[in-house]
Amino acid sequence: MKKQINDPKTKFIKDSDEETREYILQKNKKTKTAAIIIGSFLILLIIGIIVSGVSFDFIG
């Protein structure tokens, strides 16, 4: 099995004008849209858990 070496130059978010391929996320419209969708889903999930807890009298 090939062992991977962590590259210290790897960035978490890449700006669109940078000339590197070592990045995890890129700062563009697609990434921002995905982050909004995932965040909205998580918020709705949390609200649903709270509402179901209140309606089944688990909370308060």
Image (cartoon, rainbow, N blue to C red):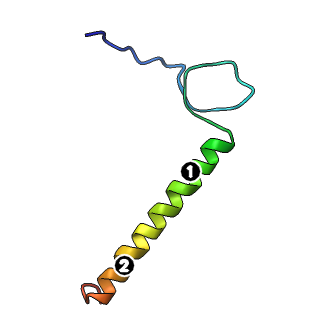
In x, y percent, where is residue 15? 69, 32
Going from N to C along the chain, the mark reached first, 1 or 2, is 1
Answer above or below: position of 16 versus 40.
Answer: above
Quarter of the rendering occupied by the N terminus: top left
* Residue in the image at 32% along x and 89% along y: 55
Q: Which SS class for mark 1?
A: helix
* Residue in the image at 41% along x and 67% along y: 45
In x, y percent, where is residue 59? 28, 85
Task: Report the front residue among 60 and 51.
Answer: 51
Residue 50 placement, left or right of 59 = right
Can you tell which quarter of the image residue 46 is in?
bottom left
Gap between marks 1 and 2 measured at Cα:
23 Å
Q: Which SS class for mark 2?
A: helix
Answer above or below: position of 26 versus 6.
Answer: below
The residue where tag 2 is placed is 50
* Residue in the image at 49% along x and 19% along y: 8
Q: Residues within 10 Å of mark 2 (few under 14, many from 20)?
A: some
Numbered circle sitting on residue 35: 1
Quarter of the rendering occupied by the C terminus: bottom left
Residue 12 placement, left or right of 2 = right
Task: Report the front residue among 45 and 18.
Answer: 45
Answer above or below: position of 44 versus 15.
Answer: below
Task: Report the front residue among 31 and 7.
Answer: 31
Looking at this view, name the residue that lies furthest to the right: 17
As shown in the figure, which amino acid type bears the numbered disc 2? Ile
Numbered circle sitting on residue 43: none
Can you tell which quarter of the image residue 31 is in?
top right
Can you tell which quarter of the image residue 28 is in?
top right
As shown in the figure, which amino acid type bears the numbered disc 1? Ala
